[in-house]
Amino acid sequence: MAKDDLIDVQGIVMAVHSGGLYRVQCDAGHEVLAQLSGRMRRFRIKVVPGDRVTVGVSPYDPVRGIITFRAR
């Protein structure tokens, strides 16, 4: 699936799990289990609980996603 096909949602990181997974509470009210995008790993952008992030969610599986941006 191309990056253009993902639905971008805003949320707050609630927890950090092992294996590079993050539990994100979206503004819409549901929770997403997300991982960091490759570019964020490449530039070593740290994400901690409480950070505001943008998550790309697939329309086919709205429970999993990719963190593409960390707001300041």
Image (cartoon, rainbow, N blue to C red):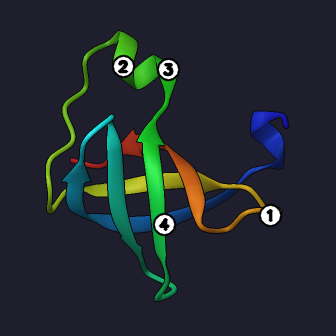
Q: Amino acid at mark 1?
A: Pro
Of mark 3 and mark 4, the one earlier in the sequence is: 4
Q: Residues within 10 Å of mark 3 (few under 14, many from 20)?
A: few
Are the residues flagged by discs 3 and 1 in contact, CB closer than 8 Å?
no
Instruction: Indicate whether 13 appears above or below 38.
Output: below
Q: Which residue occupies 34% across, 62% down?
A: 23
Are the residues flagged by discs 3 and 2 in contact, CB closer than 8 Å?
yes
- Kindly state the secondary structure of the residue where label 2 is placed: helix
Compare residues 17 and 59 and report the one nearer the observer. 17
Which of the 4 image quarters holds residue 70? top left
Identify the residue position indicated by label 2 in the image.
41
Identify the residue position indicated by label 3 in the image.
38
Q: Which residue occupies 20% across, 61% down?
A: 15
Tag shown at residue 34: none
Identify the residue position indicated by label 4 in the image.
32
Q: Amino acid at mark 4?
A: Val
Mark 4 → mark 2, Cα distance in angstroms: 19 Å
Of mark 4 and mark 2, the one earlier in the sequence is: 4
Count of numbered circles on the image: 4
Mark 3 → mark 4, Cα distance in angstroms: 18 Å
Of mark 4 and mark 1, the one earlier in the sequence is: 4
Mark 4 → mark 1, Cα distance in angstroms: 13 Å
Identify the residue position indicated by label 1 in the image.
59
Q: Is residue 16 left or right of residue 7?
A: left
Q: Residues within 10 Å of mark 4 (few under 14, many from 20)?
A: many
- The image position of residue 34, as x and y in percent, is 46, 51
